[in-house]
Every structure is written in C-alpha cells, then in structure tokens.
C-alpha cells in the first residue's frame, strides 16, 4: 500500500513538473530590481543637469519595470519663452519613433499571411518592378545604370537594405533624388512610390545598411496589401486598440496648447526656439502624404503603451496586436555579418537590426558606448527622443525632448548610464 501511495505521489509530481517545463521561462521575474531609489536619484540628477546647463529647454522620462511604473519626472520647459513647463501630457514630435509603429502595422498583415518577408516588393507593387542601380556617370555626364543583382524584398524594407538613397549630396544620384521629391507631403503614398520606383537605387538590395525611406515604402505596402488607406489601417489595427488616441499625424487646435516647442542648438551651444510655422506645420494640416518613417506626435504615456505591448510580447491589457513569435522575429537581428557597410548604425553600440528596431547583440565594449542589455531593442527620433524595450529586466523607457540637431550633447548616453549605472571598464 505504501509503495502504491509513493508511486501515485511520484506520478503526480512528474506531471506537475512536465506542465511547468512546458511554460516559457520568464527571466524577468528573477532579475534584480534595476530602478531602485539610487537609480531614481541618478536619473533625476542627470536630466536636471542637462536643463540647468542650458543644453535643452525641457525633458521628460517615463520608465516601467515588470509592468509597474517605477520612474516619471519632467524638468524645464516645453516652451521656455512662454514659461510652459514640460509635463506628462506634453505632445512632442517623435519623428523616426514612428517607424516601429509602421513596422507593427505591416507585421499584422504578415500574421494574416498576406505576404512573406522574402517576397519581392514588386509582387505587390509594380511601381518597383523595373528599378535600376546607379553606378556613376559616363564621360558625358549621363548616369550609368545597372540591373539589380536580385529583387528588392519586403525584408529589405524592414531592415534598411532595400537600396534607396536619401541624401541630395550623393554625387550624381543626389540630384535625381532631389528632383523626384518623392517625400513631398503633397504626394500620396502611391505617387511617392511611383516617383521612387523611377529613381535609381543607391546600391544593390541586400548589400549594405542605409537609413532612408524604407519605412515610408512599408506604409505604402500596408496600404497596397490591405486595400485600406495607411492612416486608417494603423489607427484601426495598432493605435486605437492600444488606447493610443493621442498618437497622431494631426494635432487638433484644442490640443495645441500642449504641443512642445522645438529647439535648435547651434555650434556655439546656444539654444534657440524654432518658429512654430516652421517646426509644426506638418501637424496643423491634413497632408496627402501619410509617412511611415516619421510624422507622428505622441505623449509619454501614449508611447509607453506601445513599448509595454512589445515587452509583453504583443499583448497589453488583454488586447493582442501581435503574437509572441512575431515580436521575437521583429526583435531578432536580420543583418548578416556580410553586410559591412552600415552607415551610422555602429554609433548605436554593439547592435544589429531587426524589423524597424536596432537590436543589441553584445554588451558595451567601452565606457564611451551606449549602455544597454543584450536582447534590448530600440529606436529614436530626429528631435532626440528615445525609447527602448529591455526584455531581460522587463524594462521599457521613453525619453522625450525636442532638440535639433539630433543628440549632439550625449543625452541618450547619459540617460542610459543613469538607468543602468555607469558602464564598468572592460577587463581585457
């Protein structure tokens, strides 16, 4: 009888153990607390110092750890001249932090099996069927054009390897890009695609990483594949389900009092406010072009909802935007080591690139590098905004500031060091 009881008890224990082993391990539960009282003081001191030094007019930050708010503060002014404080509800221009939202909209269609990542873009968009690659000029000044070595794929769009050039100063090609003016806000996404399809590529698809209009083409692909205007699709399938009503392309008049001013720091370190008609005109009118690569405004709490959805593997408050498998696909490195030309990407640290995110592959190798945890994925914006998702510690961080040129004052590096603690010297 005792043997029978022992057998039954053992059988039950094995069953329980098997059930537990089926669950994915949650490393975040066992991770030590990162944002403790010392870290809070460190972050406060760091952000305040940038305002006190006159390098920025105002800054705010919001951090969650293990689904709980562990830090919020704001320093300085959203509008220094009007003495309007930076606030939790301040609306800012997030520029390229629009990109991960566009990528998320695209990947909802991927989950619907509407396309495969390695499908040629031209399968859905004949506008890109006959593209050529620019290879210089002949002795008469005419462009030398070659056929691409392979077709541009949707994966290329998601990792910035499609071949598009973006700079008007590229010898020869730059003039053609400028004349095409594909990203003119009076173009529709279809007109943008037509103009881009007629402009030669800067390099053969898949051969280098070059930041540019790839995510604007992703928005066009969403529109083309879904059959729905991109602005409506992203609103219905990403923003509204997440409760991100204040993440918008257009800021209505009643909310413009919360819209932060934009500042430019010159070479002498002087901070000057840009005129609203120059800095905010994109958001005061309904323009035909709904860009995927920039153009959204947001608030701290609104953008945090997007980050929290990502750290929770696609679900927030019982609303599922993506499956865990898709989030893992987006936050995995898609850049092969053979892609050696990577423009400014190495300045972000020991990173590769996933689907509209930089992805940290290795710890910092020097104290000068950006701090972060292996497995983190992140991106930033032209006006020096920043966010990241740290799945190891289950941390999400959003930093808002409105500063041009992009972070030449080391704000991101200092903020990261304040969150995680200064990088220790690497022992070789």
Image (tube, rainbow, N blue to C red):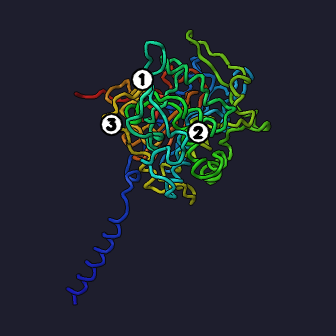
The percent position of residue 27, horizontal first and vertical second, equals 37, 52
What numbered label is drawn on residue 69?
A: none
In x, y percent, where is residue 186?
A: 69, 32
Q: Residue furthest front?
A: 140
Camera-nearest residue between 123 and 406: 123
Determine which residue is flagged by label 2: 292
* C-alpha gap between disc 3 and disc 2: 29 Å
Q: Secondary structure at mark 3?
A: loop
Helix, strand or loop for disc 1: strand
The front one of 37 and 73 is 73
Q: Residue at x 42, y 49 (%)?
A: 329
Q: Quadrant of residue 404?
A: top right
Residue highlighted by disc 3: 362
Q: Is residue 334 visible?
A: yes
> Gap in Å between the C-alphas at discs 2 and 1?
28 Å
Residue beneath the point at 28% across and 28% down: 426
Q: Are marks 3 and 1 in contact (CB under 8 Å)?
A: no
Please name the residue shown 39% across and 39% down the image.
150
Q: Nearer the viewer, mark 2 or mark 1?
A: 1
Task: State the CA–CA distance, disc 3 to disc 1.
Answer: 35 Å
Rendered location of residue 145, percent (x, y) = 44, 26
Neighbor class of circle 1 (other Cα within 10 Å; few <14, some 14-19, many 20+) is some
Task: Give residue 135's mark.
Answer: 1
Query: Neighbour class for label 2 at 10 Å: few (<14), some, many (≥20)?
Result: many
SS label for mark 2: loop
Residue with the most extreme top position: 268
Q: Relative to residue 400, is residue 116 drawn left or right?
A: left
């Amino acid at each position: 009888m005792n043997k029978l009881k022992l057998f039954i008890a053992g059988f039950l224990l094995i069953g329980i153990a098997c059930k537990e082993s089926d669950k994915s391990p949650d490393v975040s539960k066992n991770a030590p607390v990162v944002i403790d009282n010392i870290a809070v003081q460190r972050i406060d001191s760091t952000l305040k110092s940038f305002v006190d030094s006159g390098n920025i007019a105002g800054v705010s930050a919001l951090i969650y750890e293990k689904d709980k708010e562990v830090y919020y503060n704001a320093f300085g002014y959203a509008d220094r001249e009007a003495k309007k404080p930076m606030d939790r509800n301040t609306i800012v221009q997030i520029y390229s932090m629009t990109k991960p939202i566009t990528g998320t909209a695209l990947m909802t269609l991927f989950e619907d099996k509407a396309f495969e990542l390695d499908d040629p873009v031209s399968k859905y968009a004949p506008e890109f069927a006959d593209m050529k690659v620019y290879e210089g000029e002949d002795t008469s000044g005419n462009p030398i054009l070659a056929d691409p070595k392979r077709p541009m794929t949707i994966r290329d769009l998601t990792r910035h390897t499609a071949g598009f050039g973006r700079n008007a100063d590229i010898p020869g090609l730059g003039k053609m890009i400028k004349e095409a003016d594909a990203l003119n806000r009076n173009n529709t996404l279809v007109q943008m695609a037509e103009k881009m399809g007629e402009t030669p590529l800067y390099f053969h698809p898949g051969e280098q990483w070059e930041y540019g209009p790839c995510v604007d083409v992703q928005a066009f692909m969403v529109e083309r594949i879904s059959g729905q205007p991109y602005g409506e699709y992203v609103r219905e399938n990403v923003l509204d389900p997440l409760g991100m009503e204040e993440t918008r392309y257009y800021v209505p008049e009643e909310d413009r009092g919360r819209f932060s001013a934009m500042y430019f720091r010159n070479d002498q370190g002087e901070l000057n406010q840009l005129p609203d008609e120059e800095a905010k005109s994109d958001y005061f009118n309904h323009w035909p072009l709904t860009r995927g690569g920039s153009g959204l405004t947001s608030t701290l709490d609104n953008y945090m909802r997007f980050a929290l959805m990502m750290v929770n593997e696609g679900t927030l408050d019982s609303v599922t935007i993506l499956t865990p498998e898709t989030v893992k696909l987006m936050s995995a490195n898609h850049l092969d080591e053979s892609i050696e030309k990577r423009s400014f990407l190495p300045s972000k640290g020991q990173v590769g690139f996933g689907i509209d995110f930089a992805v940290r592959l290795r710890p910092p190798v020097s104290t000068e590098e950006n701090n972060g945890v292996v497995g983190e994925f992140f991106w930033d914006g032209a006006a020096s905004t920043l966010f990241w998702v740290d799945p190891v510690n289950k941390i999400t961080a959003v930093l808002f500031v409105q500063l041009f040129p992009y972070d030449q004052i080391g704000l991101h590096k200092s903020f990261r060091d304040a969150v995680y603690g200064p990088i220790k010297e690497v022992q070789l």
